[in-house]
Image (cartoon, helix red, strand yellow):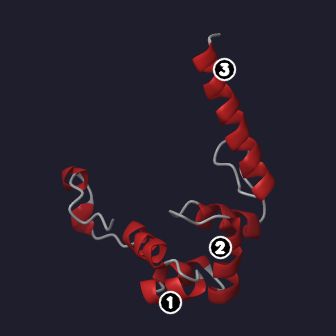
Amino acid sequence: MNAQETTVLILFATCQGRAWATGALPRQGRRPYGKARVQHRILQGLPGIGPAWTKRLLEHFGTIEAVMAAPAADLATVLGSGERTAKFIRWAVAETAATFGPAEASNSDWPL
């Protein structure tokens, strides 16, 4: 193992340790059991959403369905100054039938 591989390994371990320390649910490995943990896992899969914002969103909107249907302005209000994150969430969950398939490769609707 050379110095570069060692550095990459240390950085990887640090990132994983930080994720566990902050309460972020890991994406690989065991799946969470219980409705609340599954809801947190789903919301943390959204761009820019971590454990703290997941908790705030569920406290404010009550359900994942309400979070997904919320307009960007409401999401930004709950997230504080997260207007960019709110727009990115809306972009990630708003889908039309026309965006699936070969047209998916174009990023013309990319919000950022």
Inspect this view and state whether residue 4 appears.
Answer: yes
Q: In this view, does 76 lie to the left or right of 91?
A: right
Which of the 4 image quarters holds residue 41?
A: bottom right
- Tag on residue 6? 3
| First in sequence: mark 3 vs mark 1 | 3
Q: Nearer the viewer, residue 2 or 59?
A: 2
Q: Is mark 2 on a helix, strand or loop?
A: helix
Q: What residue type is labelled 1?
A: Asp
Quarter of the rendering occupied by the C terminus: bottom left
Of badges 2 and 3, the one in the foreground is 3
Q: Which residue is under mark 1?
A: 74
Where residue 46 sits in the image (x, y, percent)?
Answer: 53, 64
- Tag on residue 101? none
Query: Mark 2 to mark 3: distance in Å?
Result: 33 Å
Residue located 74% across and 48% down the image: 18
Task: Judge the density around disc 3: few (<14), some (14-19), many (≥20) Cα neighbours within 10 Å.
Answer: few
Q: Is mark 3 on a helix, strand or loop?
A: helix
| First in sequence: mark 2 vs mark 3 | 3
Where residue 8 sits in the image (x, y, percent)?
Answer: 61, 27
Query: Mark 3 to mark 1: distance in Å?
Result: 45 Å
Q: Which amino acid does label 2 sit on?
A: Trp
Q: Which residue is under mark 2?
A: 53
| First in sequence: mark 1 vs mark 2 | 2
